[in-house]
Amino acid sequence: MTSARVEFVTGEMTLCRPGVDDNTLRAWDAADEGLLEQAWQTLPVGQSRVLVVDDQFGALTLGLSGYAPCTVADSAVLAGALIANAALNPDLPEPPRPLHWQRPPAGPFDLVVMRIPRQAEYLGWLLRWVNSVLGEGGYLLAGGMIKHLPDRSVDLFAGAVTTRAVLPARKKARVVVCQRGPATLAGWPGTWKGYSVPGLPMPVEAMPAVFARDKLDIGTRELLPLIAPVVTQLPEGSRVLDLACGNGVLGLTARACRGDIQVDFSDVSSQAIASVQHNLAGAGGDARSTLFHSDGIDDAAGQYQLILLNPPFHEGGVVGDHIALRLFRDAAEHLAPNGRLLMVGNRHLGYYQTLKRYFGRVEQRGASPRFVVFEARR
């Protein structure tokens, strides 16, 4: 983890991107710079209630520390990043502890500063939610890198909020200035979408920030048939973890195979965790399941006889295997003796050699033209 000194309109800060050693992966981008500059011009410090939405690594929250902002983020990455970056900037006020979508903040706010997400449906959800907390006469500043803006962004803004200005692009980033619109989440059909899975009693549903929420991911499709044969071999009372669980389809499938095992779920997205809670409740509930909103495996999770994993390969617009590497390391540390990791990954990423760094035994269990399924043991 390396840090860099950067100058924003709100002052200089030292920022790092925890969990990666690649010097080219920065903890901020031009969208952060544009949002901070526009926020500074929009409202005076000390006289406004400010909310930051989906800050990535703390640049916005720390950059707006003079406003004593509240911050809410779907990703659990922000909590650790804020701690790390606050330590690098001891002259700044202590940042707030991030809230998430299972415990969102209450309005009204005079200013909402928001990173525009890559997912169109999540953007539509966010804009409607912002309408519920933005005060009358308040402003929403929404910004993102142009190459990462979702399709139909203009239509999504027009259908939810009142756009006052689309600022000129700077350094390939865009900032949009908005005010509250009439659209709300009440009765909006986009909050939940799902699909049916053979062997499960009800459709598996998810909220908008969750990957592949309206159809079964093709990688997951390769892994699903291999779960039951492994689960049936587990000792009685075994613990299973669905890591990077998304809507929880892997863990729910394992849970449907045996009634005596404990199945836990972990994901970096709070909307993913809320989706798993929703799906467990629809399946009759499971008091034995623990859900972790965590970047990786929570230290308190303990050990598991089986970990199921379909690792993501992008974070904040950056595509690569750095997330999978962290998850492989965590899985190796949390496998019980004789425990197994059953995972699927894109063939071109070459996960076999990567897994060999952390596991003594790695075997291929399935394959398709695009994906490979591996079983790894300590």
Image: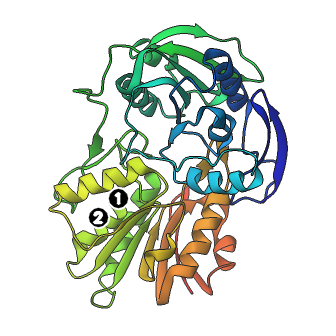
Q: What is the number of the mark on residue 248?
A: 1
Check whether the beta carbons of the residues at disc 2 and disc 1 lie within 8 A of each other: yes
Residue at 45%, 81% in the rendered image? 302
Residue at 65%, 79% in the rendered image? 358
Q: Is residue 6 above or below residue 283?
A: above
Foreground pick, 92 / 265: 92
Which class describes the residues within 10 Å of circle 2: few (<14), some (14-19), or many (20+)? many
Q: Give, as a three-letter code, the residue at label 2.
A: Leu
Percent position of residue 63, x then y: 69, 36
Percent position of residue 118, x then y: 54, 34
Give SS at disc 1. Answer: loop
Residue lying at the far top in this picture: please name it. Answer: 164
Q: Give, as a three-letter code, the residue at label 1.
A: Gly
Q: Is residue 172 left or right of residue 77?
A: right
Q: Say which quarter of the image contains residue 184.
A: top left
Q: In which quadrant of the rendered image does the C terminus lie?
A: bottom right
Observer able to see residue 161: yes
Percent position of residue 373, x then y: 51, 68
Q: What is the number of the mark on residue 252?
A: 2
Q: Say which quarter of the image contains residue 249.
A: bottom left
Q: How many numbered discs sit on the rendered protein?
A: 2
User: What distance separates the C-alpha of mark 2 from that of mark 1?
Assistant: 6 Å
Percent position of residue 26, x then y: 76, 45
Observer able to see residue 372: no
Q: Is residue 19 above or below residue 205?
A: below
Foreground pick, 241 / 364: 241
Q: Say which quarter of the image contains residue 370.
A: bottom right
Foreground pick, 309 / 241: 241
